[in-house]
Amino acid sequence: MPPIEKTNLGSSAYYYSQTLIFKHNYTVTATFMKIIKAFITLSLTAVLVWALQTQFGPIPPLGKFLNPATGFWQNAENKRIISQRELKLPGLQDEVTIKYDEHRVPHIFAKNEHDLYYAQGYVTATDRLWQMDIQTRSASGRLAEVVGAKALETDRYHRRIGMVYGAENSLRAMLQDPKTRLAIEAYTDGINAYVHNLNVRDYPIEYKLLNYKPEEWKPINCAFLLKLMSETLSGGSDEFLMTNTLNKFGTAVTQDLFPDHNFQEDPIIPKGTPWNFKALPVPPVSASFKAQMAANGKPAGKVEGIGSNNWAVAGSKTASGYPILANDPHLRLSFPSIWYQIQLSAPGINVYGVSLPGAPMIIIGYNDKISWGVTNTDADVLDWYQIKFKDAGKNQYWHNNQWNNVTRRTEVIHVRGEQPVTEKVIYTHYGPVVFEDSVSKRSNPNLPAGAALRWIAHDGSNDLKTFYLLNRSKNYTDYRKALTLYTAPAQNFIFASAGKDIAITPNGKFPLKFADQGKFILDGTDKANDWQGWIPAEQNPTVKNPPRGFVSSANQSLTDKTYPYYINWQFGPYQRGTRINTRLAAMNRITVDSMRLLQTDNYSITARDILPTLIAQIDTSKLDRNQLKALDILKQWDKRYDANSIGASIFDAWWRKVYNLTWKDEFGDEKANLQWPSRDRTIKMLLTQPRAKWFDDSNTPGVETAEDIVSTAFNQSVNELSVKHGRPGLGWQWGKIRPTSIDHLAALKGFGTGNFESGGSSNIVNAIHEGAGPSWRMVVQMGPSVKGYGVFPGGESGNPGSFYYTDMLQTWKEGQLNELLYLRSAEEKSERIKSVTILKKNDKK
Amino acid sequence: MLFVLLLIFSLAASYVFPWWIVAIIAFVASLLMANRAGHAFGSGFLAIFLAWLVLSLFKSMPNEHQLAERVAQLFGLPHWTLLLLITCIIGGLVSGLSALSGFYVKQVFMPSTVKQ
């Protein structure tokens, strides 16, 4: 029946259409859901990838850093070294052979000077690229570019003290000389040959952590490296504190507490050494000598513990009959190591030693005819001048009875993630006005006008030429000639030769000054305060083959009072120097090993000088058990700062306490901005002026004497030690109480050594003091066939993922030295050579 | 199959392209081959987890894990294996998520899967 059929049909159609609608609805919903799901998962993926590619604060982009293809896993070096390698590099003139010994020290054999320094640049970059980058960034005020605003103040300081200005001047001087020009340009090309071929995965790990890229090396970076050394070694100044001290206590007290010559002295140039020259007239003392400091800002203070030892003994005192030279420069220790060992050989040169990553040539080392080393001289080559500006515009300043125009130097500091900061630094004829109010306003609104900095590091100087010549020197005459070209940072250059000469010369370009010029802030309006010329280089203090049979230096005073020129009012204390001199005088038939033992000598001259006096002040009837025990230990102590010494811990704490209790009441803490009298002056007072008013604690009604201070100090320090370390015993050992550690340059946890126990201290020959100490120990036996020994606390590689990152550390800790491999020629066979790299010129254009 | 393909491609591509290439590989492979959401994510995650494990160990074992140990300390982790685990999980997550999104994108453009 049609209707039914129809109905049926209709019902079926209805059903079908309903299904379609339903299905359509279902499809729309499902499709929508699918899009949503796809959208959400896609977005999540995108966000995740973005987050892993982005740096959050100090955390590196995790995907970039952790992925095994280009991230840090790629920096893990294989223990096995490829024994033969050949590289084709652009710009080489000939073939270069590089032999690596078991410590990965490269021994470079080139056929010409260009290739020699090219190869030095190449291998140094291979091992130390990031260190070179970060150090030049630090020197040139470009840290904020990679680490952001937190480094802005450091950058600003470096810009404002004129580091860039000084480096530019020095670069000009270095490029004027054809020899150093060739070396610097070839060295730069060598570094860049490495940089240009660098894959992302090969970037040193620190680039990956800090999330930035290596950049091309520029010749000026070599100058920055040397300026950084100048800053470390001659960039400190006490003038601000000294001026405050002068203002507070007056001239008489200041001259009494801060004398120009120490109570105990043992100068570098032996007392009585005659001066064989006609001295220039010394400039007259200026009328405005006593300057007032009304400035803001505080220049970096001097750091104790940055000093060094060197000595050379004549053949008459050695077992072999030939001189032996020893040197250990003390610096803040870090990873990657400060120094980079290398042998450089080409026609006319074959030298071994340590270089500074970022500068060509060898700074401390030897060849088969001579050896040389350096310690810091600490000459006063940095002075502050109070500037009187005409008005708030600061366009003119008063000097030599007239208004003079200033110039302004623009320094643009790029800051990662922020707008660049522009500094306009005022320059006078002295140099930059470092802390000017436009800067200081940010930290302190009440600051008046600033002071200008006159600093030797601003002067154009070609110090590399000195090292160029020393690397090739054959005898004493060559050594002297090389030294005359040197400017800064002033160093005590020690020398020994196969020709059996020994010598030492505190050397640098020294301004000709009246006595104490620059001890305090100088009046910048008075022309008589300007540097009035220079001490002629050949009149720098020097001594050759003195009768005592040795020469030495340990940052102490340079000469006795007969030297006609003023170089500085204060030098390092005498203790290290006198220990070295006493030992050397007593020693005969000296060997390399006895020199090594002297380098690691822990004997305390301070303890020798004052411990009996300290102990004599103690009334034993008033001591408790711990104090009696401690006193007993001290009485038996051998005066050595060995790692397991308990006496050293007690003495050290006691002496520090005596020093603090003596001066703190009058000179206050750091905020008081006063200079504290030296250890030497305190010792003099303790030994010869026990009733001095300074011993009286001004915070108590009674009148204290040295005896009271010493006794109180003893009780307090023993009590403090007991609280921290229990009863006197093994827990009091010096190595435990004063742990040492060597940190990574960027203070990255896990990349340094962590704490370890060690002997030594500042003012001990073995000057390991917290994170500072002997950054390179070297002993060289001169003779028909020179033999060198040396070690630094670290390794050749700067890569924490290398087996050569810390491989020499243990030897250093043990006070041992490695025999250095000095190859006579590229052909010389040695079992110690583990791999060879041949550099060939790349003919492809 | 998806897993094997992802493993091979990510191992091969990682030395030439940036690390996030694994996301693209996982996305495309999944777009073509995944048949279930779980399958896509699982294969994506496991393949890169494994690939990164192999690649990391390939560098770290001859190094006696010295660097991994130092970096683990830097990140405050007690042992370098945790660093390895984090590395592999991060790789796995990126790849797994990307594979999952590849599967869902495929779903959008595929004809309806509802059986008639």
Image (spheres, coloured by chain):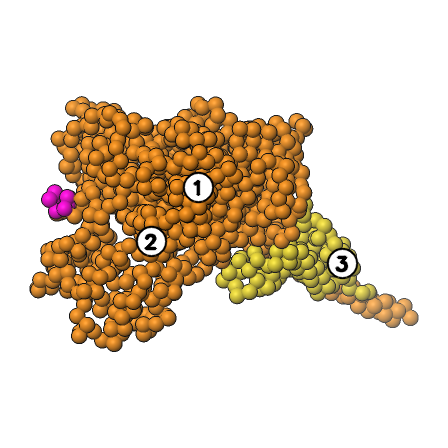
Name which residue type carries label 2.
Answer: Ile
On-image quarter of the N terminus of chain A = bottom right
* Label 2 neighbour load within 10 Å: few <14, some 14-19, many 20+: many
Q: Position of residue A108 (x, y in %)?
A: 57, 37
Q: Residue at x 71, y 61 (%)?
A: B43
Of marks 1 and 2, the one in the foreground: 1
Drawn side of residue A759 relative to residue A521, left or right: right
Q: Which residues are magenta?
A: A250-256
Name which residue type carries label 1.
Answer: Gly
Q: Which chain is yellow?
A: B
On-image quarter of the C terminus of chain A = top right
Q: Residue at x 52, y 63 (%)?
A: B77
Residue A252 within the magenta-colored segment of the rendering: yes
Q: Position of residue A348 (x, y in %)?
A: 53, 28
Q: From mark 3 to mark 2, how far is it between C-alphas?
A: 65 Å
Q: From mark 3 to mark 1, how far is it between C-alphas?
A: 74 Å
The residue pinned by badge 2 equals A764
* Label 1 neighbour load within 10 Å: few <14, some 14-19, many 20+: some
Q: Are labels 3 and 2 assigned to the same chain? A: no
On the question of residue A34 being in view, the answer is no
* Marked residue chain, label 3: B
In terms of depth relative to the viewer, which is nearer, A711 or A448?
A711
Of marks 3 and 2, the one in the foreground: 2
The residue pinned by badge 1 equals A321
Q: Which chain is orange?
A: A
